[in-house]
Image (cartoon, rainbow, N blue to C red):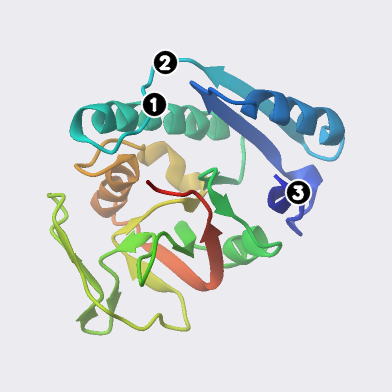
Amino acid sequence: LNALHDLDYPKDRIMLNFIVNDSTDETLSILREYENCYREEYAGIILQEFNLGTCPDARVMGPRAKTRLTMECLKNVLLVMALHADADYFFFLDSDVILKPDTLTELIGMNVEVCGGLCKTGTGECYNFLNARIGTAIIDFIDPESNIFERRPFAIPAKPFPVDYLSGIILIRRDVLPSIRFRDGKGGEDRGLAFDCRRQGIQILINPGVFLEQVMERE
């Protein structure tokens, strides 16, 4: 929340929409306190609670499949709300990604349909994208219609580059929103969104100058 509040983009042009689903901790009360402190600074702050009976994400097939369906539903709630709010952009952020102050300004400044920042998602060279094509080289190989991929060592380029799949942090321009949705794409709801983009001929770009941190610990 501190990183979100420190964004250098004008707060009176930002509407924050938080979804809390099946929480077992103090997340909702923390967000309510944040809303009470800062509601006058933003165009709006919306808190929504959904209790869909989702079990903890044990990262095994049964519970994981239900988690993905829940995430698909909730992310689409946010996307549709952005449409109804007449927003210029829909900026989606996973709760475990820490923003830098210039993140939103940099991404909006790219003036592209769909883009995101570079986020390290684990130990080693593991990032939040798949299948980046730079020149004739394929950085991460993936069969788009399966959940099988092979990671290969690579050097991150200095300029924005196209990818087939992006997760964690996504900025979508308004004119694209009606034609795409989050959906389970044999590997997660973000993968399904990427398939929609591919079918519509929409390029997804990563800006490596927007480098972010993921803080969630994985067991």
> Residue at label 2?
52
Q: CA distance from mark 1 to mark 2?
A: 10 Å
Q: Left or right: where does residue 217 sit relative to residue 162?
A: right
Q: Left or right: where does residue 177 sit relative to residue 25?
A: left
- Is there a contact, CB below 8 Å, between mark 1 and mark 2? yes
Q: Position of residue 71 (x, y in %)?
A: 39, 32
Other-residue count near label 1 (Cα within 10 Å), few / some / many at <14 / 14–19 / ≥20: some
Amino acid on which the number 1 mark rests in the picture: Cys
Q: Position of residue 91 (x, y in %)?
A: 56, 47
> Residue at label 3?
5
Q: CA distance from mark 1 to mark 3?
A: 26 Å
When the figure is inspected, residue 219 is found, relative to residue 18, above or below; the finding is below
Please report the residue visible at 26 percent of the width from the left and 75 percent of the height from the top. 139
Mark 1 vs mark 2: in front: 2
Sequence-first tag of 2 and 3: 3
Sequence-first tag of 1 and 3: 3
When the figure is inspected, residue 114 is found, relative to residue 82, above or below; the finding is below
Q: Secondary structure at mark 3?
A: helix
Give residue 59's quadrant in the image: top left
Amino acid on which the number 2 mark rests in the picture: Leu
Please report the residue visible at 53 percent of the width from the left and 23 percent of the height from the top. 23
> Residue at label 1?
73
Q: Secondary structure at mark 2?
A: loop
Q: Left or right: where does residue 29 sit relative to residue 37?
A: left
Amino acid on which the number 3 mark rests in the picture: His
- Is there a contact, CB below 8 Å, between mark 1 and mark 3? no
Q: Position of residue 160 (x, y in %)?
A: 45, 75
Q: CA distance from mark 2 to mark 3?
A: 29 Å
Give residue 39's quadrant in the image: top right
Relative to the observer, which residue lies in front, 58 or 115? Answer: 58
